[in-house]
Amino acid sequence: MTRIWGWTDPKAELFISFMNKSYSTKVNTDGKWQVRLSPLQAGGPFNMEIRSGDDVVVIKNILVGDVWVCSGQSNMQFPMSNAKYLYTDEIANSENPSIRHFLVPERYDYRMPQQDLESGKWVQANPETVLDFSAVGYFFAAELWEKYHIPVGLINTSVGGAPAEAFLSRETLKTFPDYLATAKKLSDLSQLQHVIKEIQKENDRWYNNVQDKDKGLLHNEKPWFDPEYDASRWPVMLLPAFWDDKGLNDLHGVVWFRKDIIIPASMTSQRAKLFLGRIVDSDTVYINGTIAGTTAFQHPPRIYDIPATLLKPGKNTIVIRVINTSGRGGFIKDKPYFLESGGQTIDLKGEWQYSVGAAVKELPGSIMINCQPMGLYNGMIAPLIYYTIKGVLWYQGESNTQKAREYQELFPALIAEFRKKWGQGDFPFLYVQLANFMEATDGPCESEWAELRDAQLKTLAVPNTGMAVTIDIGEWNDLHPLDKKDVGHRLFLAARKVAYGEDNIIYSGPIYESMKTKDHKIVISFSNTGTGLISKGGGKLKCFAIADVNKRFVPAMAKIEDNHVVVWSKQITDPVVVRYAWANNPEGANLYNKEGLPASPFTTG
């Protein structure tokens, strides 16, 4: 049953007209009102008239369809604009008034659940607006529309870096006393303001110090971004690389990079694009002494649009000022580094001159004040709970990997929280398992990321849930892989089964079900095998490990027999447990079903 609600003068009488039906209600003494509408047929657009006395409000262009809450952290927040050069055709063909996106403004509150949002509006998809849509959400919605021709609304309420506990209410946090204690501490407004002020002071002090000490910006000589500056004595560094791998050990502050390139006339007098992979942590790019782009933090892809007037035939000077606050600074490998114009490219990998502008102590770590327990529930979830929804799409977990085992309780508690607050029963809750990330390792290892994936796998025991496995579409060097289309597609497959009741759909890759020992081997059974198990690409199955009672894992042989997987090792005579794809980045994991969907990582222990 669809609800509409709002606020007006206490005890006023309200009359509503919508889809040729009339409704009325009396406003409560606190000014709140709520009306439940009769069952609605998908379609639109429609208008709604709300009248109270002489006051009339008309809401136009309303659609009736399926609304999905898109929540989690930065991979759900990830906008189409961050991958616009990967999805040029999809963006160009995105015009669809039946797909709409509502971006919930970021807000946290540690005192009480909020009733309303500070701002926001529904925006329909077209090549311009879709750039601000959640990329995962858009691709999911596009496939839903293509399949069912039901209008799709996406409520994007996600925040980069947010752990799951930030989306839990005070009531649910009682099960997690440490998090509740943090929330209570921050609910003291004076304490919260003090923490915010101290964080801001520390940040301002650090950046001001860097600015004052940066030799590249001193005014007693030409700045280092000036193309006429004499950089002939600067040493050379091969990029992309982290600079501590090139001799600048434990350096935080500013490093300048400079490269002269020769550009043919055919690449000038037209707009160009500069691809600079990813830079840790922030950068300002100059071309021929003019700022060509800047990015304030490390995660977005560096793709800068260059005006037609900035490039010239012959020698052009590119200068990059990189600021690093902590950890390793530099340029991420295996990313695109080139200048493109008129269908021609100039490779920017290789030798760059460099010089240290400022070397300072690293920026002290501080808490993310907006992502503490309860804050995002109160600010960004509570205002939505009266909105009738079809289900939830959830992409989160990266910020909980340091307490991966706790996630086995935390994540199901979050699902129960959402379902209780919305009061719509066990609505579909579809989520993304963590992708492959970080450098691959040789041989069996321990992994917090694997443990968190296992917690996500176990959460499939919660009714009406579905999981998209993504260990084959991540990027080892990027927490935010660009391939969001396949993620949206796999969530769509899960929705066809969980939300839309298609019983015959193969919606998942193989999921571990049970094991038994036989002849010093372990035989593994799976659900969701589809029309059969395969080793993708042929050859031997990879990424299996086996152990005895001492949990001493060794690499294992594995083969498919009668739609099961048999695992063994000559080193283990009495095996008790098997792991598959148990690593941060299980490179080479190749167990799939014939429908092309990867098996989830698992442990039988």
Image: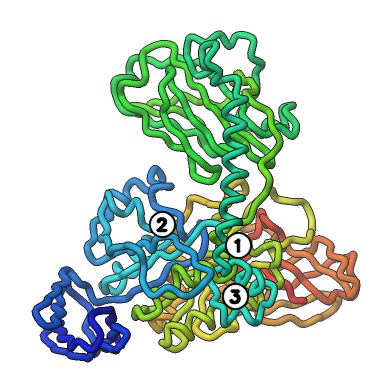
Q: Residue at x 38, y 72 (%)?
A: 68
Report the disc number at residue 294: none
Q: Position of residue 429 (x, y in %)?
A: 48, 77
Q: Kindly identify which residue carries mark 1.
A: 191
Q: Nearer the viewer, residue 256 or 514?
A: 256
Quadrant where the N terminus lies? Answer: bottom left
Q: Kindly identify which residue carries mark 3.
A: 411
Q: Nearer the viewer, residue 359 or 547?
A: 359
Of circles 3 and 1, the one toward us is: 1
Relative placement, left or right, of 517 versus 243 is right
Residue 372 can be seen, yes or no: yes
Q: Kindly identify which residue carries mark 2.
A: 135
Quadrant where the C terminus lies? Answer: bottom right
Kind of residue sitting beneath label 2? Ala
Q: Position of residue 377 (x, y in %)?
A: 50, 72
Q: Earlier in the sequence, mark 2 or mark 3?
A: 2
Relative placement, left or right, of 429 versus 541 is left
Callout 3–callout 1 Cβ contact below 8 Å: no
Residue 471, placed above or below residue 81:
below
Within 10 Å of disc 3 (Cα), the crowding (few <14, some 14-19, many 20+) is some
Q: How many callouts does the rendering have? A: 3
Residue 332 can be seen, yes or no: no
Within 10 Å of disc 1 (Cα), the crowding (few <14, some 14-19, many 20+) is few
